[in-house]
Amino acid sequence: MPLTYLTRLPRQLAGLGALALLGSASLPALAQVSPALDRGSFSIGAFHADPTFNAAVNTRFGRLDSGDSNSSSVTMPRIKADVLLFDSQGLSFDYYQFKRGYSDALASNFNVGGGTVTTTGRANLDVKIDFAKLAYKWWLGSGNTVLGLGAGAAYYRVGLDLNANAVVGAATGSISDSYSDDAVAPLLEVGLRHALTPDLRLFADASGVKKTGGSTRGEIYNAAVGVEWFPMKNVGVVLDYGITDIDIHRDSNDARFRVKLKGPSAFLKVRF
């Protein structure tokens, strides 16, 4: 798949989500849906997360491993959209971007002949992750509680720039490496919605992405629980707490990085 197409994919998915929402406004009135669902909605907000990062790269000095590096919290813009195409089926869209720079110590040991050589150094790591997903969902149930099962596609683009100075025994040297990958992978989702009242609802969501084949493989998992409150009929606020685990590695195992994000999100939500 051409790279130019993949880099345009998040915008195309966002456009598809917007078109689906616009199209829902013209759909004729169908049967009464569960009070836990909306015909269509659009949410914009932010994900405030505490990241844990781990990177490992093979170099001419051996393998450098950052270990788990905890950094100060980061706030990421995030958008979501949902639309019911029928009374119990619809589309769900989500997009966010994580971008952060790290400066941390690196250390590793590797064998040379019959001995062990210790490599130490300090590295600057710049990480950027774009993530978007679009799923088709089937909602089971028609009362105050519904269960959603979804399948679709996720797009991710990850980039890592590493610059370090290393010490190997009495020798010193510089390391510079860039790694990037973007791909489309299958997605599975499950969601639970419960309406305490038409304007106060609870929800829980989980999704998983697994990329197999090609030179790069990985998994991305998301889970969140939260509450929706609508002080006005069509405008409300959404609060949730979520965890995201992104684990990407080259098939040759010469580079791997993992980012764990956990923290609250807040959205302004408009429903139709």
Image: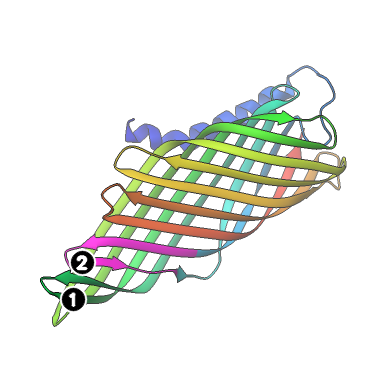
Q: How many marks?
A: 2
Image mark for residue 117:
1
Magenta stretch: includes residue 222: no
Q: Position of residue 238 (x, y in %)?
A: 74, 50
Q: Is residue 254 above or below residue 101?
A: above
Q: Residue at x 26, y 49 (%)?
A: 252
Q: CA distance from mark 2 to mark 1?
A: 9 Å
Does residue 222 appear to the left or right of 181 in the view shown? right
Residue in front for this viewpoint, 85 or 61: 61
Q: Is residue 230 above or below residue 152?
A: below
- Looking at the image, can residue 21 be seen? no
Q: Amino acid at mark 1?
A: Val
Q: Position of residue 109 (x, y in %)?
A: 24, 73
Q: Position of residue 138 (x, y in %)?
A: 67, 28
Name the residue that disc number 2 marks.
62
Q: Residue at x 13, y 83 (%)?
A: 170
The reply to whether the C-beta atoms of the residues labelled 2 and 1 are less than 8 Å apart is: yes
Q: Residue at x 57, y 31 (%)?
A: 151
Few, some or many residues within 10 Å of mark 1 (<14, 14–19, 20+): some
Q: Amino acid at mark 2?
A: Gly
What's drawn in magenta, residue-wise?
52-68
Q: Residue at x 80, y 42 (%)?
A: 194
| Mark 2 vs 1, N-terminal side | 2
Magenta stretch: includes residue 64: yes
| Dominant secondary structure, magenta | strand
